[in-house]
Amino acid sequence: MLITIGLQSFSQKQTNSLKQAYAPYFKIGTALNSSHIEEGDYDGMLLVRKHFNAITPENVMKWELIHPSPNQYNFALPDAFVKLGQKDSMYMIGHTLVWHSQLPQWVHAITDPVQLEQVMKEHIFQVMGRYKGKIHAWDVVNEALNEDGSMRESVFYKVLGSSYIAKAFKFAHEADPDCKLYYNDYNMVVPAKRQGAIRIIKELQAQGIPIHGVGMQGHWNLNWPSLQDIEQAITDFAALGITVMITELDITVLPNPWDLVGADVNQKFENSEKMNPHPNFLPDSVDILLAKRYEDIFKIFVKYHANIDRVSFWGVHDGVSWLNDWPIRGRTNYPLLFNRNYKPKRAYKSVISLVKQAENK
Ligand code: XIL
């Protein structure tokens, strides 16, 4: 009886959705995979429509999928993504134009600077140009930095030097002058890496090349990063006069192999019982820690809402999170606000009640 009453009172409070509750603060986004885009995951799409007002394609606009060989573009799924977004009045973020990962071999193999610049330009013009006026913002360059803030030795850097970033943003601005252009990376909470991002942003600004925002991928865990580092990162970027986005939020509750910090998609490790401690369900004790962690983090986001345009989760519910397969394949992870049965978790309740409490004050 008590349980029923508890559920009823909870569901009555659910007249609001995440996007409605957070409307005074920032957009609430999620990443869509092909099962959502093709409307196969019907229940998943119900959650998307109810709770989110911004969408990012998890994979289908990445170079190796959208432009796998020099004269081949696969626009079917990206087109479907944009159509879906338009139908549901979603804010749409393109992800991503220039990135060393999920980049086809034919691009990695280019060694001539003139050719690579031309290929990059054509890629940006074709992909952005197709969705001009439809996609609102693009992650133009993704993950250009090493952990110490130096430039990552990607094919773009090796062949074109650090000016490839300015070129990419310039081409992107030409391809769609009204589009918001972002630099996106992980571990921006680490001071040395953040200094690298600040350097990139200042260099673009000094050259008069538009950059509108910075995306901090939020691939975090229950203990890392510290709340102070999150706060410092937001204020440091805001001081540059650009918008801050939390772009790929998920909080792993599983052990971290070799104390891995970050989100380099190329790092993979072996599975084992020790590394997969909750194969069947999320214990209450961990669920509570996750809810508290989300609450603490969202308190910071709300505090700096004037500087934050969007907080996007990397996935709709636990069952489709990339963290079930990265950095170890075949684990059962619980990093998001909705569980595998499409039901809100404690973390959802802590995140939504945070702003409801604030409203009631
Ligand atoms: C991930 C996707 O979620 C996976 O499905 C894919 O296999 C690998 O890439 N940083 C990014 C995202 O910018 O594009 C990555 O997405 C996660 C890390």
Image (spheres, grey):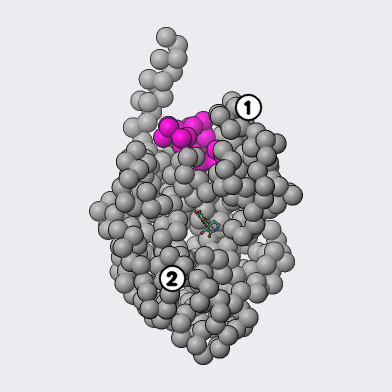
Sequence order check, earlier mark of 1 and 2: 2
Depth check, front residue: 5 or 46:
46
Distance from label 1 to label 2 (Cα)? 45 Å
Q: Please state if 116 lies on the left or on the right of 328 as rendered.
A: left
User: Label 2, on which residue?
Assistant: 68
Magenta region's main secondary structure? Answer: loop
Q: Amino acid at mark 1?
A: Ser
Q: Examine the rendering and report whether any part of residue 82 can be seen.
A: no
The circle on residue 285 is 1
State the quadrant of the N terminus. top left
Depth check, front residue: 3 or 73:
73
Q: Residue at x 47, y 80 (%)?
A: 120
* Number of residues whose C-alpha sits closer than 10 Å to that of mark 1, classed few (under 14), some (14–19) or many (20 or more): few
What element does badge 1 sit on? helix
The answer to whether 159 is drawn above or below residue 200 in the figure is: below
Q: Residue at x 55, y 29 (%)?
A: 281
The circle on residue 133 is none
What element does badge 2 sit on? loop
- Over which residues does the magenta segment extend? 333-351
Q: Position of residue 68 (x, y in %)?
A: 43, 71
Q: Would you identify the image quadrant in which residue 143 lies? A: bottom right
The answer to whether 313 is drawn above or below residue 202 in the figure is: above
Q: Residue at x 59, y 25 (%)?
A: 284
Q: Please state if 302 lies on the left or on the right of 191 as rendered.
A: left
Q: Find out if the beta carbon at label 1 lies less than 8 Å from the nearest ligand 1 atom.
A: no
Q: Examine the rendering and report whether any part of residue 219 can be seen.
A: yes
